[in-house]
Each structure stands twice: as structure tokens, then as C-alpha cells.
Amino acid sequence: MTRDETLKLITKIKSYYPNWTPKVNAKDLLENWFDVLRKYEYDPVLSMLQRYIADDESGFAPSINKLIPKQNRYGYSERIYSHEDFVEMERAALAELGL
């Protein structure tokens, strides 16, 4: 995500949650959010914001961790395995066991 996209996201949050008043100045807010979100793509983060708005009943703006796509939290990246991947893993496990 770029700085401009981060600013766009923050602007959206401010428009959806007009009572949201972070306790830092605008420049620091942008830099802090960009620092966390720079490694993510804009569209999945925006999708998480839309999901948050649809599901949340608290009325409070989301914290930044609520916007990180779930498969990317904690450094975890989801991987879809193919049948061939499982065959190869089984072959490697059997070889390691000497079978």
C-alpha cells in the first residue's frame, strides 16, 4: 500500500466514523498507519474495512489490526496446497523415516 492509499483509507474511516479522533497529529497518524500497512495491498485492506463496517455493532472505528487481511496476520501467509504438494510431502516424510 502506498502513502496515498493509506491516506485514502484513513479518510474513508474518518468519513464513516466522524467521532473518530486519534490522539496524534495527522502527519504522525499517516506515518504510523503507513508503517504497518505498507506491506499489504490496498484492495484486501479496503475489503476488511468494508467487512468490519458490515459486521461490527460497536459503533467504534476499527483499530489497524482489524484491517489486516486475516491470512497475513502474525506473518502467516495462507497457501493453497495441490495434490502434488501432498504427494511430495508424503514422499519426503517416508524417506525421512527410511521407508
Image (cartoon, rainbow, N blue to C red):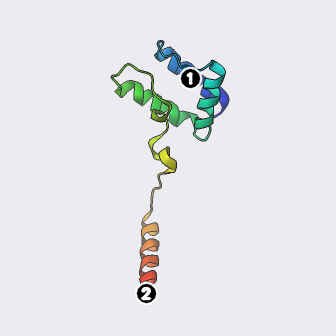
Give the x, y percent position of residue 17. Answer: 46, 16
Q: Quadrant of residue 6?
A: top right
Label 1 Cα crowd, 10 Å radius (few <14 / some 14-19 / many 20+)? some
Name the image quarter holding the C terminus: bottom left
Q: Distance between the residues labelled 1 and 2?
A: 56 Å
Residue to which mark 2 is pinned: 98
Specify the quadrant that holds the N terminus: top right
Q: Label 1: which residue?
A: 10
Label 1: element kind: helix
Q: Upstream in the sequence, badge 1 or badge 2?
A: 1
Would you place residue 54 above or below residue 65 in this image? Answer: above
Q: How crowded is mark 2: few (under 14 residues within 10 Å), some or many (20 or more)?
A: few
Residue 40 point in image, percent of width and height: 57, 40
Instruction: Reply above or below: 72 against 91.
Output: above
Residue at the spot 41% in from the left edge and 83% down from the top edge: 97
Furthest-bottom residue in this view: 98
Position of 12 compared to 5: left or right?
left
